[in-house]
Image (cartoon, coloured by chain):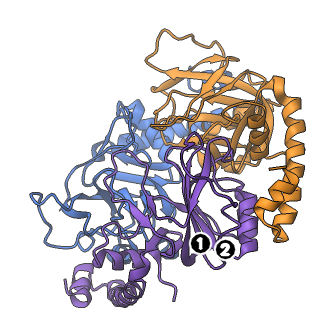
Chain colours: A blue, B orange, C purple
Amino acid sequence: MALSTCQLADALIRLGVRSGGYLADINRFSGKRVSGPAYTVQFVSADDTDAPKLSNHFVDTAPPGHIIVIDAPPHTRNAVWGGLMTAGAQARGALGVVISGRCRDLDEHRAAEFPVFARGHSIVGQSPFTRPSAINVSLLIRDPGEQVTFPPTQVAPGDWIVADGDGVVCVPKELKTQVEELAIKLGQIDERCMEDIQAGKGVQASFLKHRGK
Amino acid sequence: MALSTCQLADALIRLGVRSGGYLADINRFSGKRVSGPAYTVQFVSADDTDAPKLSNHFVDTAPPGHIIVIDAPPHTRNAVWGGLMTAGAQARGALGVVISGRCRDLDEHRAAEFPVFARGHSIVGQSPFTRPSAINVSLLIRDPGEQVTFPPTQVAPGDWIVADGDGVVCVPKELKTQVEELAIKLGQIDERCMEDIQAGKGVQASFLKHRGK
Amino acid sequence: MALSTCQLADALIRLGVRSGGYLADINRFSGKRVSGPAYTVQFVSADDTDAPKLSNHFVDTAPPGHIIVIDAPPHTRNAVWGGLMTAGAQARGALGVVISGRCRDLDEHRAAEFPVFARGHSIVGQSPFTRPSAINVSLLIRDPGEQVTFPPTQVAPGDWIVADGDGVVCVPKELKTQVEELAIKLGQIDERCMEDIQAGKGVQASFLKHRGK
C-alpha cells in the first residue's frame, strides 16, 4: 500500500479530524516517501531549566522501524537535527525524521538517502538554543505562522506518520485501519473520476457520477 | 515573443503601474513558462455562507487558451487545486493555473507538465475550508505577509498573465500592446548594456551610454 | 580547506559569538559554495531622501576576489540584484553575492554559474522601491521574521563570508584564524564521532568518548 498524504488527509477529514492530520509546512529535504509509527521527542528552549532532562541521547532510544517526530519551540532559527543524528538514526534502524523545526547538513542527509522533513534549514546547531526534554510524549504540532487559524495536529507515540513530496500526515493509531480502508476507497473513486475527467466528461459530471455530488 | 516576467514588470513600472503587475510570492511548482489571458476565480472561506455559489464547477467553465487565476482567502493552509483539477483544465485546453493560495498532488502536475504556480503546497483539499464563489470577476491579489507595504495587484478577466521561474506578472489588457512594445525596447537596451558590461566597460558607464542615466 | 558553514558556526558559538555568525534564511539560488572577504553595500528605501547617495555604481567598485554583501530594507518585495549585476560582478572578478533581500533573473545567474544567495526572488527591480546608499560600512543583518529572538549578525567590510547549501556565515576578520583552527579541530572530532556512530556505538557514548560530554 502506498497511499499518498493527500489521500490520507481526505479520509481523516471525512472521519471528522479537523486538521486532516496535516503537519502544516513541514517539507522534504531528503529521502523518499516514508511511513511508520511515531517515536516522539519534545524539545524545549535551553533557558527552560525547569523542564525535565533526558538521561540518554534521544536518538539512541529510537525504536527500529519508527519515524522520529521532533517538536522544537516555534520561531527558533537553530537546527535540532544534523548529519551525526542521521547516522545514528540509520544505525538504530529508524526510518526517517519529521521535525517541527530546522535541520542542517543537508548534503549528508541526501548522501545517506535518509528521509528528513523539516520546517526549514539552518547552519547553527541546537546548543545553546534548545535541548531535548522528553521522549514518548504527545506532541501538539502548531504552524508557527501569524494569523493562522488552521487547527494544530496532535502526534501521540505510535501514531502512524506518512511523509511524501506533498507534506506530512499523522494518522491517530486508533483510526489507522479505518483511515486506510477509507483512503483506498476514496482513492478508487478518484481514479474513476480521473478517467472520466481525462476523457473530457467534465469535473462536475464526473464528481456527480462517482462521488455522488 | 518570449518576454520575461522581469522585462514586463520593468515596462509596467515605467508606465506608472506601481506594483509592476507583480503577483508577489506566487511561484512555480510545475511546468514551463506560460502566457495567456486570465480566467478568474474567487474563492471564499467555507463559513462565508452569504457569498454567491457557482452552478458549475469552475474548471468546466474555463475557456480554452486561458490561464486560470485563483484568489483564495489569505492564511489558509488547505489546497484549492489538485491532480483532478489539472486533468480537467488540460481537457478544457486551459494553459496553466496561478493560485494566490496552495496546491497539492505535486507529482501529478509535474507528470502532466501542466504549469502550476502557487503560494505553497499542502496535503489537505479545499473542503471544508474554502469554496469557489465567483468566476469572471476582478481579483485583488494581496501578499499575505506581515508588514508588507508592496501594493496589491488587480487581475481582471482577460488581463494578460505571464508566469516563469522568476514569478508571475499581470498586464492589464488595455496596456498589453503598449507594455509589449516598451518591454521589447527595454530588453534591447538591456542587451546592449549586457554586452558592454560583460566586456568590462562598467555598469555605470554602460547604463549611461545605453539607458541615458 | 573547505569548512562547511555548519562547522564554522559551531566554532563561532564556542568562541562566544551568540548568533554563530549565521545570516538566517539567506539561501542559495545559483552557483556553488563560495568563500571570501565581504564588500558591503547598504540599501535604503527610495523615499529616504536624507540617506547618502553613491557617486559610482556599487558593482563597479567591488574589489576582485570579494563577496558582495547587500542589506536591503526588510519586508521589501523588489529585487536588488539581477542579471546585469551578475555580469558586472563577474567582469570585476567578484566571487559571489549575499543579499538580505531579493534577486531576480534566476536563469541568468544559473547560466553564469555565479553564486547568488538571497532571502527570496522577485520580478520587479529596485527602482522605484530601494536604492544603494553606502559601501564599505558595517551591516546589521536581521531576520525579518516576526517573533524572532535569534540575534542579528554584523557584517563588517573584510569579514570572511562562507556560503553553501546550508546557509551563510560571517566570520569576523579578527577571529578568522582562530575560527578556522577550531573548526578544523571540531571537524576532526566530528569525524571520529561519525565513525563510531555509523559503527553502531551510540550517539551518547560516541560524544562522551570524543567530545568528552
Considering depth in this image, is B34 or C180 the residue closer to the camera?
C180
In the image, what residue type sits under mark 1?
A: Ile
Pick whichever, A103 or A179, lies toward us: A103
What's the residue at 90%, 50% (across, down)? B188
Q: What percent of the width, then of the height, locates residue B99?
A: 62, 35
Judging depth in this view, the residue of A27 and B89 nearest the camera is: A27
- Residue at image point 44% right, 40% down: A9
- In this picture, residue B8 sits left or right of residue A1: right
Q: Which chain carries label 2?
A: C
To which quarter of the image does residue A17 belong? top left
Left-right relation of B89 to C144:
right
> Which residue lies at the image location 68% right of the left edge and 48% below the top edge?
B30
Categorize mark 1 by other alpha carbons within 10 Å: few (<14), some (14-19), many (20+): many
Circles 2 and 1 on the same chain = yes
Whether residue B154 sits left or right of residue B79 in the image: it is right
**Residue bearing mark 2:** C94
Task: Please tell me how crowded label 2 is: few (under 14), some (14-19), or many (20+) other residues with Cα within 10 Å.
Answer: many
The local secondary structure at tag 1 comes to strand
Residue A176 — which label?
Answer: none
- Residue B16 appears in view: yes
Considering depth in this image, is B32 or B25 the residue closer to the camera?
Answer: B25
Q: Which amino acid does label 2 sit on?
A: Ala
Disc on the earlier residue, 2 or 1: 1
Q: Mark 1 lies on which chain?
A: C
Quadrant in the picture for the N terminus of chain B? top right
Q: Which mark is residue C67?
A: 1
Q: Could you tell whether C52 is left or right of B98 in the image?
A: left
Q: Can residue A209 be seen in this view?
A: no
Mark 2 secondary-structure assignment: loop
Tell me which residue sits at (35%, 85%) in the image: C190
Give residue C208's quadrant in the image. bottom left
